[in-house]
Image (spheres, rainbow, N blue to C red):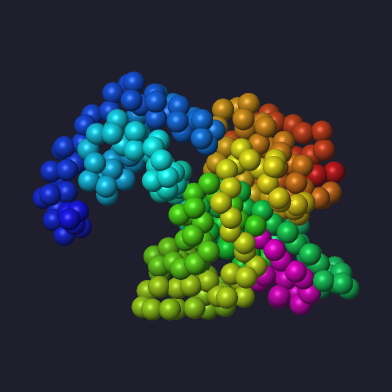
Amino acid sequence: MKPNMDHDPGLGNLLVKRLAKMDGEQFQQWADLLKRRTGMRLPDNRLSFLATNLGIRMRELDMVDFQDYYDYVNSGRGGVVEWDRLLHHLTVHETRFLRQESVLALIVERYLPAGAAQCDESPKTIHVWSVGCSTGEEPYSVAMAIDDHMSRLGCEYYLGVTASDISRSAVAVGRKGIYSRQQLKGVDPRWLHNYFDEIEVGKFQVGRELRKRVCFNQLNILDTGDAPIGEMDIVLCQNLLIYFDREQRIQIANTLAEHLVPGGLLVLGVGELVNWEHPQLNRYHYANTLAFQRQ
């Protein structure tokens, strides 16, 4: 029977000590695998990061040797399933609700109607794509901001949010939309009341109506050109491009630009793609954002 380290810290520490040390050659083969399968690069100074995150998953499997685990990940159907679980440890990064408030402000103040008089007679359609959505905090934050603004104006509208991430585990969390009170600490009490249901003490689920507007799917960012994703009004790709080489960053940004409708917004992470230009995009200047608008 697999030992339960949650209740035996002494045994947990023993297994930590038993983990083999990762050498440079092993690091390189893992880095090559990650690059080959996801496009993400892992600089040499990230050995500690890689060893730590592999170790987390290895201890769950009661494995101690990096080479054995590498062979396991690359073997058979079980390896395919394990690779997806491992990706959750390697690619899911810090995220929280309302993390990029300047981006939400840009969308509300500059992209959406400013007043009821600007609302179209027919319902306005808003399509949003959150690329690298992790466990759902970003797409739900954007959906809440848009719904709150449009509802207060009394504008009729349709909102559809596509949320994609390479990690199936992260996408599964987003679909359920269940978060702890700690994860929601930055959410305005009015939004918490309007958009969440407390399903048990300290646990909240995104309300059914909002969840219906957000569609989660597993997608490798390098496959976006072939993905069945249509034209979008807003595309968000933040805190993701930094894990790719500049040439790949440009390739990804160019592909995302092609998914924008005329007048649509592309929002990237500040500092993630310096001096990039696209013939159909104009830089959209707004404080603490890196945004572009399609002509």
Would you say 138 lies left or right of 185 here?
A: right
Would you say 229 lies left or right of 269 here?
A: right
Highlighted magenta segment, given as a residue range: 147-161
Q: Residue at x 59, y 52 (%)?
A: 164
> Outermost residue toward the top?
25
On whether residue 151 falls in the magenta region, the answer is: yes
Q: From where the camera sits, is residue 192 visible? A: no
| Residue 165 position (above or below residue 190) | above
Q: Quadrant of the C terminus?
A: top right
| Residue 266 position (above or below residue 272) | below
Q: Residue at x 19, y 53 (%)?
A: 2
On whether residue 184 falls in the magenta region, the answer is: no
> Outermost residue toward the front?
76
Which quarter of the picture shows residue 242? top right
Would you say 151 lies left or right of 241 here?
A: right
Which quarter of the picture shows residue 13? top left
Most foreground residue, 171 or 254: 171
What x and y, as percent, mark residue 43?
A: 44, 26
Q: From where the camera sits, is residue 41 visible? A: yes
What x and y, as percent, mark residue 253?
A: 68, 37
Most foreground residue, 37 or 261: 37
> Outermost residue toward the right?
121
| Residue 227 position (above or below residue 274) | below
What x and y, as percent, mark residue 67?
A: 29, 30
What x and y, as percent, mark residue 15?
A: 17, 43
Q: Residue at x 44, y 78 (%)?
A: 198
Would you say 140 lies left or right of 61 here?
A: right
Q: Residue at x 73, y 71 (%)?
A: 150
